[in-house]
Amino acid sequence: MAPATSERPTTAQVYANLHGLKLHFPSLQSILSSFPTELSPQYGRLCEIVEKNIDDRIEEPDIRAKAKKINIALLCAYWWPRSSLERLVTMSWFVFWIFVWDDEAEESSTQDLDLDSKTTLSERALRYVAFHLGLDPPSPPPSGNIACVLPSSPPTSRRHHHQPNDSDPDSLFVSSLSSKEPPPPTKYSVLFKPAAEGFKQGCTLTERTRLYSEIQLYLHSSALEVATYAGGNGTVPTEKEYWVYRRGTNGIGFFSCLGEFMTEITIPQYLFQTEEMKTLWEELAKNVVIVNDVLSLPKEMKVNWPGLVAIDLTYRTSCHNLDKAINLLVEDLRQVSTKMEAAGARLREMVAQDPDPMVKKHVEKYLHSVYTIMTGHYEWTLATERYGLAKRGWLKSDKSVAIPL
């Protein structure tokens, strides 16, 4: 165990004080009551398709079983309840890829952080992703992506797209792509290929470059997360330090920018540059991270990985009070909902006078898709075997959760 500094305890020390306690997390139904919650009528058929894809693609029984525990179909059906089956299948490939990639990348984290390596794991992944998104022109056009919402961006993140140049290290591998498919950086990176194929058939170049930007942020943030923790000798990061990489590693920006594709609409691209859209994406990410960090606490405690519970116990509460830390996070979730509702209302106002009636309809569909990601993620988290809340008897009939630590 790494020793604590005079100012910061290690994550292991913080978690050691939690053993034997019970984490109480209330139902979020009242906080989320203003937002839609729906399950796609395509859920049953999607389950069959996803199950077959997992069986066909994953060789190892343990990885296959782990993939099935995610319940990818349920996640997609909650996130995008009004999408066609065809687009839900495409989305399921994206979800399949990102979950398996995350597990594979963890095993390769040491290699990825080798500063002497000419080609890191994330850079090889980005070459592969760019190729299958059809993004290998010398100068990719601006994506119209939202401005960076992080307190400070991870190195080489690309929420702002710009014209590559010789001094831009990330532009070099994008511009040097050839017509030859790069080798997949990990065994199951090939899962990205069917996702990209489905996506390219129904999206614009702007949407592809925007998606690439978010995948780039996700991959670089994942490497930064490991580096930050290793550099801190296992101590608990501050909230500011944590959010620098966590809004990237949660992957919600990656899924948020698929909203137009999944709802088969196009909204005015200037909206992606507004403060309101930035607020939607930022607060949605915050909601997902808080719910994940609280309900996955037993898993994080096993490996002493820091999350918002450890951070709140260290920096936001006195006497390391678990109930108070959870109450603070619940209040954060309440504020998230208020901000998201207000941002949506302002986006509606922006297009209220647009002469094209389809613009208002499309913006409404887009907002619906953002809101159902938030409510759907919560419903999926309660139900999925990945967390095992229901299976272990931790989920109560009123949707509150009590987890023994």
Image: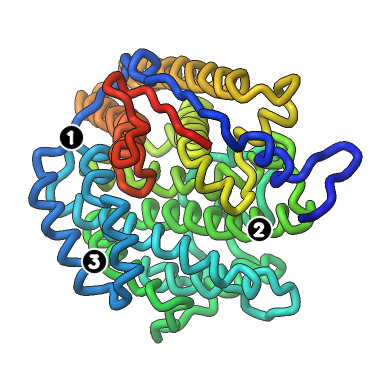
Q: Residue at x 51, y 72 (%)?
A: 138
Q: Is residue 67 above or below residue 297?
A: below
Q: Is residue 292 above or below residue 24?
A: below
Q: Position of residue 273 (x, y in %)?
A: 50, 35
| Labels 1, 3: front one | 3
Q: Residue at x 29, y 72 (%)?
A: 61
Q: Position of residue 45 (x, y in %)?
A: 8, 51
Side of 206 where 355 appears, left or right: left
Viewer-closest of 86 and 275: 86
Kindly identify which numbered label has been placed on residue 268: none
Q: Position of residue 245 (x, y in %)?
A: 63, 47
Kindly identify which numbered label has been placed on residue 39: 1
Q: Which residue is mark 2?
A: 226
Q: Earlier in the sequence, mark 1 or mark 3?
A: 1
Local crowd at mark 2 within 10 Å, few (<14), some, or many (≥20)? some
Numbered disc 2: secondary structure: helix
Q: Which residue is mark 3?
A: 54
Distance of label 3 from label 2 (alpha carbons) = 28 Å
Numbered disc 3: secondary structure: helix
Numbered disc 1: secondary structure: loop
Q: Earlier in the sequence, mark 3 or mark 2?
A: 3
Side of 161 where 9 appears, left or right: right
